């Protein structure tokens, strides 16, 4: 082992000694507790860097946006799981998280990926309008919906989007990725003739590009945020359960035709 | 349904209309984004109430304490899962959360439960010292370790504990539960003749009682905090993996005796 | 390591060499494939022993009984998860399994535990009737339902129970634990004045005692069986989804009062 | 709803009445228990059809092959989870299953997909050799490994493959898909100049095509099989734990450089 400069099993996140606990280079008791809020500490844990005040404001807003989305399939799965194993709240949260895949988180991840691949972080571009036109044309040619545009309920606009862009402007993060997303939205509406407002996942995808985040990290924001939301749902389920009622309804309806009742 | 005042399937957490998103009675775009940090929003989501500045400071510190605990079995499980399904980061976080049960989170939950059952929120007590003596005697008679005391690594004190109690004092939450925990710790040391410092889970259990939280909610804090920590571990695992090396080592060692090598 | 007879990380289940794969001492290609059915191999994997023909018949029947129970909360959780992450079928099965806790599997585990603690595997008893009377009295004094008795739907008898007991008799496993369970059922009906037929979990709990299984293993049977059942549900969900319809209904109903509609 | 011939929430898998339990059209007590083994019942649950004796022999062998693969990352994740939450065996199995994604199950799924897309179930082909040459050329042009070929340990052949193909021949399932897989393996060896034996996942992928299974179902076989294997690992972990030892080693090694020890 003497000549092995880097151990094969190695983590740079944290370490402990009898009298110290250090996370990402900061003493947890002395430099973190009482000095950071949870969003800032998440930023530190994930990126290894302390957030600037502007990054703190923006990052907290992004993650908060992802915490609670109503009675989603994820929340229903968590509640159903809790009904069977109330002694394992952690497993009910886990069950709810398992569904945060391509269908729900895919859009946010997709918007961030589309923007960062269209306009690489280390590259330059003079003509964002041309990029937007080309991007929309390419997605339309593939016949897949452009990520980050449109919403089944929130019409004509998604109320989170202008607020997120406003915060981006206030915190110096309304740069070329926000502009590109807006140009793509406008071009998509023009090309399709349909109302396609930028939704919250599109706004967040663009702002994540302003941060310079790799697109793969974005799913992690959704997962950690939703864990908070799901704990809230499970506490409510513990006090006012809906799982057994839902179970009974589904059981009755789903097999009625087999029982000869339908 | 006309006379049904309360629907059987009902949630008070959030609702959406085309132009509004409201969580716990607050407009997400207008009253939350840009106005709250993630810890405050978690407090709102879980309790239904807005945190006071003191509650905000204390609650953020509690949850932050629970985010990152090094290369725990939970972190190893998450990394191992990610190695097999890197396309499903959410499932790797879920796998890591599944292990936050009686062994690791039990201590914090247990401390909160012990204190709140010893000294009910709606009750009174003039003699905390007698309560502490009786409590220690009862746990010792059962032969089970008192939750919240002692730590295998952090000796003679857990460096998080004085800082958490300091923050409690600064924020008006150093009341009878903190005192009771400290009295229990002192009595346990006296009765056992061993050093049994209050660890972070004991401090958090006591402060959660100061908040008036039911003990069952405390596990939820640990789960949502660790979700953040696990995302950090998975991002690192994606960049510098240790899973395959660990797999190889375990596979080789575990079956060496069967292969006739040991 | 020279004097270490047993490695600290050791498993006796399986090993591989370039030309061999051996599980529980049997060559997988030569002694297992084509020679055992899945239930027999599960028995081998879990117990380390090859099932006798009688054990094979009984064990396959027990596990099969646990595979499919209709549109349970577990199945709904799995389907909801699949709706969000169809690329991760494994995570949807995992979500469904997470709910197999105290409420649903508890009864089977509880029956096995009650019987094996009442009548230890290495003990003797001449008076099963007295044991039954004492057991029922003890459970009634605690005010908790006796595990393995009664069923909300299957009345007056659970149709699986006589069949499982018939198979136990045919395979030489209708011994004192089956008798004790039947005596407990009869005494519980007498003492309560209510119809309390032995349900499938009671029958399985008793037969697991005839096998000599430790009660903790019983939950594992339920978990592995349900994994099969859940895969069936997810394949159906992929072809004829119900998740989005359920989601919409729950979302609409749960927050109607918040939107001012109820 | 009167004119709705098919309910929106509908399942054809099972139903219960007070005196009946019917799965896939068969009475569980009368037609299944004592008449089928677990593999046959899994076949019924997943496909809706009773297996012929030949299908039974082959299907049981396929699923058994997937049960136990040693101390895989999946098994390690399950054991680590169990260490933290021994009261939730189901969650530990769930954690282990979460990692059965693209890396480990992908190969089997990929082989089945490659073969069924190359040679559709409803199509004809006179020249399998040409198909094999074209397929290998296409995969090589993409620079991705051909699924189902090669194995890091099992050289020069995977001992499961000849046995699985032997069983396929004995049960009338050694048809054009098995031939195509063998031709692809031979052509890949010729084109690459490397030994690329068909591994177990390639053999299973080909035989699944002989069954006519859609490639998406194949992952489900792996998931349900591994659930059985993981229960075996957890029972062993309960009796002879390795988790805490592994945890300690990883914790020590991973952060040694941060503590200034490396």
Image (tube, coloured by chain):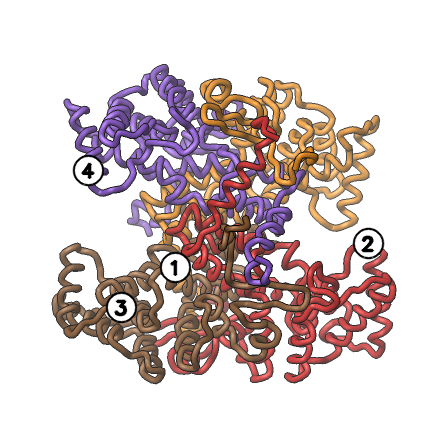
Chain colours: A orange, B purple, C brown, D red
| Residue C193 sits above or below residue D237 on the image | below
Chain letter of mark 1 equals A
Chain letter of mark 2 equals D
Instruction: Quote the CA–CA distance across marks 2 and 4.
Output: 68 Å
Let me know if residue D111 appears in the view.
yes
Instruction: Quote the CA–CA distance across marks 3 and 2.
Output: 62 Å
Image quarter hosting the C terminus of chain C = top left
Q: Please identify, in this view, whether the residue under mark 2 or under mark 4 is nearer the observer.
A: 4
Instruction: Quote the CA–CA distance across marks 4 and 3.
Output: 34 Å
Left or right: D245 with respect to A209?
A: left
Q: Position of residue D140 (x, y in %)?
A: 84, 58
Q: Give the labeled residue for mark 4.
A: B138
Q: Please identify, in this view, whether the residue under mark 2 or under mark 1 is nearer the observer.
A: 2
Q: Position of residue C71 (x, y in %)?
A: 43, 63
Do the residues at discs 1 and 4 belong to one chain? no
Q: Please identify, in this view, whether the residue under mark 1 or under mark 4 is nearer the observer.
A: 4
User: Mark 3, residues whose alpha carbon is within 10 Å: few (<14), some, or many (≥20)?
Assistant: few
Residue drawn at x 42%, y 36% is B222
Task: Locate residue C152: give its quadrant.
Answer: bottom left
Tell me, yes or no, whether the two marked residues, 2 and 1, touch with CB atoms within 8 Å: no
Chain letter of mark 4 equals B
Tag 1, which secondary structure?
Answer: helix
Q: Please identify, in this view, whether the residue under mark 3 or under mark 2 is nearer the observer.
A: 3
């Amino acid at each position: 082992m003497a000549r092995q400069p880097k151990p094969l099993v190695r983590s740079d996140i944290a370490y402990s000694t009898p009298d110290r606990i250090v996370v990402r280079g900061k003493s947890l008791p002395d430099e973190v507790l009482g000095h950071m809020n949870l969003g800032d500490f998440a930023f530190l844990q994930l990126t290894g860097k302390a957030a600037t005040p502007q990054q703190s404001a923006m990052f907290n807003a992004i993650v908060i946006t992802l915490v609670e989305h109503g009675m989603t399939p994820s929340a229903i799965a968590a509640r159903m799981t809790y009904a069977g194993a109330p002694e394992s709240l952690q497993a009910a949260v886990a069950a709810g998280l398992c569904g945060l895949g391509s269908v729900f988180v895919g859009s946010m991840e997709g918007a961030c990926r589309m923007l960062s691949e269209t306009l690489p972080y280390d590259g330059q571009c003079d003509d964002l309008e041309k990029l937007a036109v080309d991007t929309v044309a390419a997605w339309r040619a593939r016949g897949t919906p452009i990520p980050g545009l449109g919403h089944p309920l929130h019409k004509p606009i998604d109320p989170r989007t202008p607020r997120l862009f406003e915060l981006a402007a206030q915190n110096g993060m309304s740069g070329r990725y926000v502009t590109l997303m807006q140009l793509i939205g406008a071009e998509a509406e023009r090309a399709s003739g349909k109302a396609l407002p930028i939704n919250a996942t599109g706004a967040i995808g663009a702002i994540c590009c302003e941060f310079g985040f790799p697109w793969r990290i974005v799913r992690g924001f959704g997962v950690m945020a939703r864990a908070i939301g799901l704990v809230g749902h499970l506490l409510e389920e513990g006090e006012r359960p809906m799982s057994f009622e839902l179970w009974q309804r589904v059981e009755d309806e789903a097999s009625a035709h087999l029982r000869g009742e339908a």
